[in-house]
């Protein structure tokens, strides 16, 4: 779990931290997609979560190897709910959730215990080949 200010620089910082977590989990195969999903969800929270000053955004990322799933959550105290809107041809933004929709296996929005909501996305973790047998020199 990490907390971020509602500032655009937080997105790059979160991405850098998440990249290290993905490497530690051995998930280089889905790094690009996972980083885009995190970036889009966090950018939406930074831009649209209208909350009182000082409130932070929280990210939670976990991998469940048993189910083969990487879960990304972005928590904020704002009341608004994200939804897929079709951006017009001249729109400058509005495509973030479409990227999440395309890259994630599932995504959604849920209520928090406190004020606000969290937006989550899950990506499949690719099967990993078994570790090679250790080399044993012959007699």
Image (tube, rainbow, N blue to C red):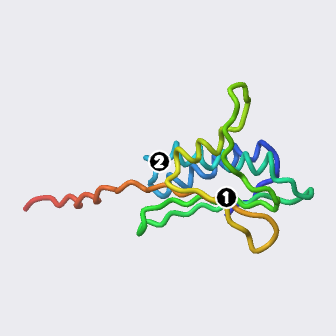
Q: Against 3, is 12 above or below?
A: above
Q: Which residue is mark 2?
A: 30
Q: CA distance from mark 1 to mark 2?
A: 20 Å
Q: Going by the image, does 24 lie left or right of 81?
A: left
Q: Residues within 10 Å of mark 1 (few under 14, many from 20)?
A: many
Q: Quadrant of the C terminus?
A: bottom left
Say left or right for 24 vs 118.
left
In the rendered image, residue 93, in percent from the top left (x then y), is placed at 72, 34
Q: Does residue 63 sit above or below 8 in this rendering?
A: below
Tell me what residue is drawn at x 70 percent, y 47 percent.
13
Secondary element at image label 2? helix
Q: Residue furthest bottom?
A: 113
Locate residue 77, reporting x and y percent. 81, 62
The quadrant of the image that shows the N terminus is bottom right
Q: In the figure, residue 54 lies in which quadrant?
A: bottom right
| The image quarter in which residue 127 lies | bottom left
Crowd rating for badge 2 (residues with CA inside 10 Å; few <14, some 14–19, many 20+)? some
Secondary structure under tag 1 reads strand
**Residue 89's x, y, as percent?**
68, 26
The furthest residue to the left:
139
Extreme top residue here?
Answer: 90
- The residue most toward the right is 53
**Which residue is nearer to you in this view: 18 or 134?**
18
The answer to which of marks 1 and 2 sits earlier in the sequence is 2
Instruction: Find disc 1 in the rendering and name its residue.
Output: 119
Nearer to us: label 1 or label 2: 1
Whole-percent x, y for residue 110 in the image: 68, 65
Q: Residue at x 73, y 29 (%)?
A: 91
Above or below residue 84? Residue 2 is below
Q: Is residue 98 left or right of residue 26?
A: right
Based on the displayed image, in which of its 4 quarters is residue 121 positioned? bottom right
> Which sits in the foreground, 88 or 12?
88
């Amino acid at each position: 779990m990490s907390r971020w200010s509602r500032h655009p620089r937080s997105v790059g910082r979160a991405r850098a931290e998440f990249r290290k977590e993905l490497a530690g989990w051995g998930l280089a195969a889905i790094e690009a997609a996972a980083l885009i999903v995190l970036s889009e969800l966090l950018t939406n929270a930074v831009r649209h979560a209208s909350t009182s000053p000082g409130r932070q955004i929280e990210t939670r990322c976990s991998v469940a190897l048993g189910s083969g799933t990487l879960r990304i959550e972005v928590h904020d105290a704002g009341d608004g709910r994200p939804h897929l809107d079709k951006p017009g041809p001249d729109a400058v933004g509005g495509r973030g959730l479409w990227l999440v929709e395309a890259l994630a296996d599932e995504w959604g929005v849920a209520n928090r215990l406190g004020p606000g909501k969290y937006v989550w996305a899950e990506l499949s973790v690719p099967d990993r080949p078994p570790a090679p047998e250790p080399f044993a020199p012959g007699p």
